[in-house]
Amino acid sequence: MQSLTKLDRLLWTSVTFKRPWTRTTPVFKLCTLPLEPVIPCKKPFKVDVVGGKRHSWCTCGYSKKQPFCDGSHKLKAPGFSPLRFFPVKDMTVYLCGCKYTNNPPYCDGTHKQDFILSAPLYEEKDS
Ligand code: FES
């Protein structure tokens, strides 16, 4: 995880609301920090897509059906939602696996940058 710069601290803030009669249990927390996905894979997925069909690309990184959404964001990353796209024709595409592409849902090579290469890979833990 990247540390916040001085400018980030000025731009982003976090506020915790507490019940007035307790001092320990927060009721809810508002945070303007940008959401960050986890990294399930550090390379793109080669996928055959169907023209005109709706595809839902996972944006949070928690899906077990990478690179597509399986609804995991509802429990694990409520601020996220899948990116829906409709290919114009049947074709083979490279969908981003690191979730940090600047051209979602397609890989743009961002996964080769140091901040991705040095970041931890998300792995589902059995509970
Ligand atoms: S896998 Fe994310 S930019 Fe390539």
Image (tube, rainbow, N blue to C red):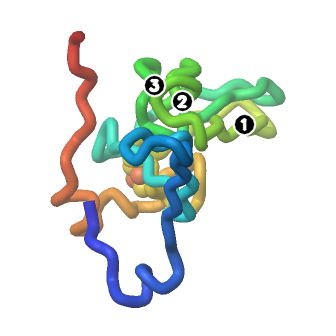
Residue pictured at 52% horizontal, 62% vertical: 15
- Considering the numbered disc 2 on the image, is that residue within a helix, a strand or a loop? helix
Tell me which amino acid carries mark 1.
Answer: Arg
Q: Indicate the secondary structure of the residue bearing disc 1.
A: strand
Pointer 2: residues within 10 angstroms few (<14), some, or many (20+)?
many
Q: Closest to the observer: 2 or 104?
A: 2
Q: Amino acid at mark 2?
A: His
Q: Is residue 66 above or below residue 60?
A: above
**Which residue is the site of mark 1?**
84
Measure the C-alpha gap from mark 3 to mark 2.
7 Å
In which quadrant is the C terminus drawn? top left
For the residues carrying marks 3 and 1, which lies nearer the camera in this image? 3
Q: Secondary structure at mark 3?
A: loop
**In this rendering, is residue 64 above or below 44?**
above
78 or 19, nearer to the observer: 19
The residue beneath circle 2 is: 73
In terms of image quadrants, where is residue 81?
A: top right
Q: Identify which amino acid the numbered label 3 is placed on.
A: Ser
Q: Give the spatial CA distance, label 2 vs label 1.
A: 14 Å
Cβ–Cβ under 8 Å for marks 2 and 1: no
The residue indicated by pointer 3 is 63
Seen at 64% across and 28% down, the residue is 49
Assess whether mark 2 and mark 3 are in contact (beta carbons under 8 angstroms). yes
Q: Note whether residue 2 is visible.
A: yes
Instruction: Say which label, 2 or 1, has the lower sequence index.
Output: 2
Place residue 97 in its image quadrant: top left
Left or right position of 1 against 93: left
Which badge, 3 or 1, is on the more N-terminal residue? Answer: 3
